[in-house]
Image (cartoon, rainbow, N blue to C red):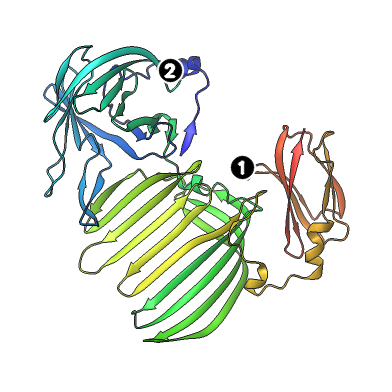
């Protein structure tokens, strides 16, 4: 998940002078991300979609909902967040959290939270469980001075309330970010998942596809290797320029007999398109016209994994499972129906300036024969000095294939300097660049991509 770090309490005081809920549990328009303390994965989000006045009370509609599995069948039912489907606020700051009725066994008991109760006050939190305020203290939350109430529940759980931010924790659920204020840990966008698809990186995807019944069908096994050449972000799409190598093995199966029909290859430049790069998928589920959709995040090293499931439960059976991992993009796509099946996986990659991870086949696997000059391009290519101390980087490629373009790239993937059709030896003035780590990317006329790490002091 993305995390926005707060460096100065004074900054927040100036920028958000009214950023205080004054013991409100939630506010209209608020988006509250909950998860394990410290993150990095948002496990549930409470999105306050609307508020409606009902007499002296205010009623808030809460989303997204979450899915309940019955007998190992996902999407059997949809219920509200852990605070219910609606929250009613009374004038005395008593919040009544209610669930919609569901036709199966599930704890939908109403929860009651009194945010302005003081130390020693007790009330019925839900059937059989009493809440008691046991502590009130000054604290710092999200870099801001705050006041915290600790509420003990008779079942052994506890709850923390913040004067500024509302509900801070309930049992194992902790408020780790405010999506509407870009504070703390955020639910990532699709662009975040493709952060390492930058020039110089290499990714390989394997796909198995079946068309036809289990007894008689055609099956395709496809390996696609992507050399990333560039990336452009627009409001509605992420455009990743790639050099693409493809190998496809086609088999025909007839009952118990399987025969290889042919092997085909592709060697082309193309654009890999990711739609809606700024879209955020909040954890939860929904069921519409027989289709069940669910999104779930889980911690994965220093990043997160997003799993998206779509299940059709009407007359015909089909299911779709997608997963994405931080910075490397789509990790798996699995579709299964009565007449077809697709299973696509990211099997390996080499991020810019890093060692290879997983399986990345050599170009020869894709029927691409590397010429002698190409083999020596990388060995004959040199840069000096490195680190750069005088603001000038010297580049030499005397015995290489002719260079078409040389670029200086920031770690984010942004191209900072570019030279077209340079000479075999030349110098690049880099004195305008701040000190730090960069990458030099060279493209030869033979199609070879050479990447070198450059440090500027």
Disc sitting over residue 450 in the figure = none
Which of the pair 161/368 is nearer the observer?
Answer: 161
Identify the residue shown where x is 63% and y is 72%: 365
21 left or right of 110 in image: right
Identify the residue shown where x is 65% and y is 75%: 367
Q: Is residue 76 above or below residue 445?
A: above
Image x and y of residue 206, in percent = 51, 66
Foreground disc of the pair 2, 1: 2
Callout 1 secondary element: loop
Where is residue 40, by image quadrant? top left
- Cα distance in 3D space between marks 2 and 1: 30 Å
Disc sitting over residue 144 in the figure = 2
320 left or right of 131 in image: right
Is residue 52 among what the camera can see? Answer: yes
Image x and y of residue 331, in percent = 47, 56
Residue highlighted by disc 1 = 412
Is residue 31 among what the camera can see? Answer: no
Q: Is residue 289 above or below residue 142?
A: below
Callout 2 secondary element: strand
Where is residue 62, by image quadrant? top left
Which of the pair 310/55 is nearer the observer?
Answer: 310
Which part of the image, by quadrant, shows the C terminus?
top right
- Do residues under tags 2 and 1 come within 8 Å of each other at their CB atoms? no
Q: Looking at the image, is mark 2 or mark 1 earlier in the sequence?
A: 2
344 left or right of 454 in image: left
């Amino acid at each position: 998940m993305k995390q926005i770090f707060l460096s100065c309490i004074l900054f927040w005081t100036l920028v958000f002078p009214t950023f205080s809920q004054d013991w409100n549990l939630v506010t209209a328009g608020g988006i509250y991300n909950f998860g394990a303390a410290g993150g990095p994965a948002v496990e549930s989000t409470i999105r306050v979609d609307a508020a409606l006045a009902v007499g002296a009370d205010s009623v808030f509609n809460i989303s997204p909902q979450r899915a309940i599995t019955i007998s190992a069948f996902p999407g059997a039912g949809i219920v509200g967040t852990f605070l219910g489907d609606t929250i009613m606020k009374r004038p005395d700051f008593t919040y009544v959290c209610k669930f919609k009725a569901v036709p199966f066994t599930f704890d939908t008991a109403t929860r009651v939270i009194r945010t302005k109760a003081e130390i020693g006050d007790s009330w019925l939190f839900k059937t059989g469980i009493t809440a008691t305020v046991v502590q009130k203290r000054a604290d710092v939350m999200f870099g801001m001075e705050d006041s915290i109430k600790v509420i003990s529940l008779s079942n052994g759980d506890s709850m923390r309330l913040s004067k500024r931010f509302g509900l801070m924790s309930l049992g194992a659920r902790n408020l780790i970010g405010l999506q509407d204020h870009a504070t703390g840990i955020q639910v990532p966008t699709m662009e975040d998942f493709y952060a390492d698809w930058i020039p110089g990186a290499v990714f390989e995807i394997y796909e198995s596809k079946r068309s036809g019944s289990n007894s008689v069908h055609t099956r395709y096994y496809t390996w696609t290797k992507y050399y990333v050449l560039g990336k452009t972000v627009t409001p509605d799409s992420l455009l990743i320029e790639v050099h693409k190598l493809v190998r496809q093995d086609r088999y025909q199966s007839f009952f118990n007999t399987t025969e290889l029909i042919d092997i085909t290859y592709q060697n082309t430049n193309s654009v890999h398109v990711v739609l809606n790069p700024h879209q955020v998928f909040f954890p939860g589920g929904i069921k519409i016209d027989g289709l069940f959709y669910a999104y779930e995040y889980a911690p994965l090293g220093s990043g997160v994994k997003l799993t998206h499931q779509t299940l059709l439960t009407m007359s015909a059976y089909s299911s779709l499972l997608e997963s994405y991992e931080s910075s490397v993009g789509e990790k798996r796509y699995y579709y299964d129906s009565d007449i077809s099946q697709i299973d696509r996986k990211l099997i390996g990659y080499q991020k810019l300036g890093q060692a290879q991870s997983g399986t990345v086949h050599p170009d020869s696997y894709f029927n691409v024969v590397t010429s002698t000059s190409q083999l020596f391009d990388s060995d004959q290519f040199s840069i000096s000095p490195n680190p750069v101390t005088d603001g000038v980087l010297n580049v030499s490629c005397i015995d290489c294939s002719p260079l078409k373009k040389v670029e200086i790239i920031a770690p984010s993937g942004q191209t900072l300097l570019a030279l077209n059709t340079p000479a075999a030896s030349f110098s690049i003035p880099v004195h305008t660049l701040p000190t730090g780590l960069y990458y030099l990317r060279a493209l030869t006329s033979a199609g070879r991509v050479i990447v070198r790490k450059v440090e500027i002091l």
